[in-house]
């Protein structure tokens, strides 16, 4: 979404980072990915539950270009909501409610009032929800409890499995 509103060097750096040549390729790739998410909504019960949503909150003191609003509405299925960022508690409550609904209750808080200040003019958010089972069940002999860090900095111990063929730990 941010690339859709960028120009010049900023856009070029974003496209390079994302590994695409131009904004049309980026949009095309997103549509392909969105089709996968969409097809999962019509899946059989053996497929993973997968959804992706986006949100935009923009200061009432700023106006987005109509072409950008149309693109995010058409492509990303979202609309920019006008808010007063000086009313931090209201914006935080709205964004966190959005995240909770988007994640089916798993993400209760993505934003805190201290993340917003007098310079905040726009907030972009994406939520990806995935629930599925592993194709290959954890090998108990390869499973170890390891530290997993939460967004608030706390760490908890969770089972990780060593996936030999990729030489990675998986949760």
Image: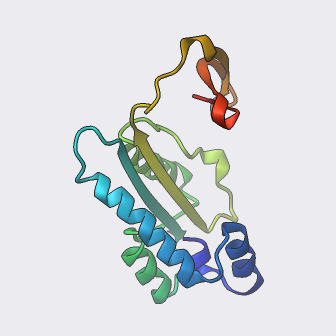
Q: Quadrant of residue 24?
A: bottom right
Q: Which scheme is used to colour this image of the protein?
A: rainbow
In the rendered image, the vertical position of residue 62 relative to residue 101, given as above or below: below
Image spot of residue 107 (x, y percent): 47, 38
Occupied quadrant, residue 170: top right
- Nearest to the observer: residue 69 or residue 120: 69
Quadrant of residue 66 within the rendered picture: bottom left
Residue closer to the observer: 2 or 65: 2
Q: Is residue 84 left or right of residue 115?
A: left
Estimate the x, y position of residue 76 in percent, counting from the top left: 42, 69
For the view shown, which residue lies furthest in the top direction?
141
The quarter of the rendered structure image containing the C terminus is: top right
What residue is drawn where x is 53% and y is 69%? Answer: 58
Looking at the image, can residue 43 be seen? Answer: yes
Q: In this rendering, does residue 80 appear at all?
A: no
Relative horizontal placement of residue 144, taking residue 91 as reference (left or right): right
Is 157 rendered above or below residue 49?
A: above
Quarter of the image that includes the N terminus: bottom right
Residue occupying the point 38% across, 59% down: 36
Question: In percent of the image, x 54 and y 44: which residue is there?
Answer: 110
Asked whether, in this view, residue 86 is left or right of residue 90, the answer is right
Decide which of 158, 46 is in the foreground and name it.
Answer: 46
What residue is at 55 percent from the left and 12 percent from the top?
140
Of residues 6 and 140, the one drawn nearer to the viewer in this rendering: 140
Give the percent coordinates (x, y) of residue 100: 40, 42
**Mark count:** 0
């Amino acid at each position: 979404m941010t690339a859709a509103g960028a120009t010049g060097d900023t856009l070029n750096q974003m496209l390079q980072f994302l590994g695409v040549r131009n904004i049309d390729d980026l949009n095309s790739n997103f549509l392909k990915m969105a089709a996968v998410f969409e097809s999962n909504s019509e899946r059989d019960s053996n497929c993973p539950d997968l959804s992706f949503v986006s949100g935009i909150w923009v200061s009432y003191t700023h106006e987005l270009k109509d072409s950008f609003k149309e693109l995010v509405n058409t492509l990303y299925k979202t609309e920019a909501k006008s808010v007063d960022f000086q009313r931090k508690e209201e914006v935080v409550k709205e964004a966190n409610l959005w995240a909770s609904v988007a994640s089916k209750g798993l993400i209760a808080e993505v934003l805190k009032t201290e993340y917003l200040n007098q310079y905040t003019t726009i907030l972009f958010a994406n939520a990806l929800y995935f629930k599925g089972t592993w194709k290959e069940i954890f090998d108990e002999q390869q499973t170890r409890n390891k530290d997993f860090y939460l967004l608030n900095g706390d760490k908890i111990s969770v089972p990780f499995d060593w996936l030999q063929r990729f030489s990675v730990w998986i949760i």
